[in-house]
Amino acid sequence: MPLIEKIMNTLFTILFLFIGTNQNIKPTPKVDIIPVVKTARISCYNDYGTTASGITTRKGIVATSDRSIPMGTKIYIEGYGEMLVADKTALWVHNKFGLTFDIYSPDCDKYFGIKHLTYKLL
């Protein structure tokens, strides 16, 4: 084998070993999915009973008008904290008003009204 081929093979081997064992090459970091914050219509109810999922109404339970959000989903609503989707509102609510979360709270009164707050699915 001519000298130039030996030199080239040696250089390729060194280059391959250097690239293959270089500790400065860092793997692509894992990207966490950041929950998207959106705004929804928020209402409040205080009727005591059983939700569609079978859970008794209590603080921290919410009904949603969005049929694509599964029961058992945790959400965070601005000013109210983490809540559990355990019920669905009437379909006409979504058709008329758009995305609505109906918060259960024994403290609801006639002054709660309708609010537009941010939320994110957890």
Image (cartoon, rainbow, N blue to C red):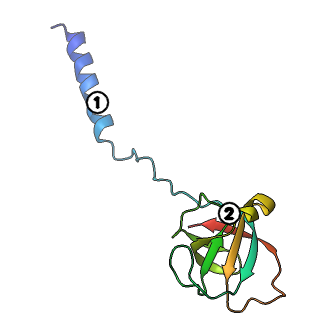
Disc 2 marks a residue whose amino acid type is Val
* Residue drawn at 50 percent across, 53 percent down: 31
Outermost residue toward the top? 2
Q: Is residue 31 above or below residue 119?
A: above
Which quadrant would residue 73 be assigned to in this image? bottom right
Identify the element where label 2 is drawn.
loop
* Residue drawn at 84 percent across, 87 percent down: 111
Percent across and percent down for residue 80 are 67, 81
Dots 2, 1 in contact, CB < 8 A: no
Left or right of residue 98: residue 22? left
Percent across and percent down for residue 13 are 24, 26
Disc 1 marks a residue whose amino acid type is Phe
Left or right of residue 3: residue 59? right
Q: Is residue 67 above or below residue 28?
A: below
Identify the element where label 1 is drawn.
helix
Residue 24 is tagged as none
Q: Which of 49 and 104 is in front in this view?
A: 49
Marks 2 and 1, how far apart at CA? 47 Å
Q: In this view, does 46 lie above or below 90?
A: below
Which quarter of the figure is the N terminus placed in? Answer: top left
Disc tally is 2
First-in-chain label (2 vs 1): 1
Judging by the rendered image, the residue that carries numbered circle 1 is 16
Which quadrant would residue 87 be assigned to in this image? bottom right
Which quarter of the figure is the C terminus placed in? Answer: bottom right
Left or right of residue 54: residue 8? left
Left or right of residue 4: residue 105? right
Q: How crowded is mark 1: few (under 14 residues within 10 Å), some or many (20 or more)?
A: few
* Residue drawn at 53 percent across, 68 percent down: 71
Residue 37 is tagged as 2
Q: Nearer the viewer, mark 2 or mark 1?
A: 2
Q: How crowded is mark 2: few (under 14 residues within 10 Å), some or many (20 or more)?
A: some
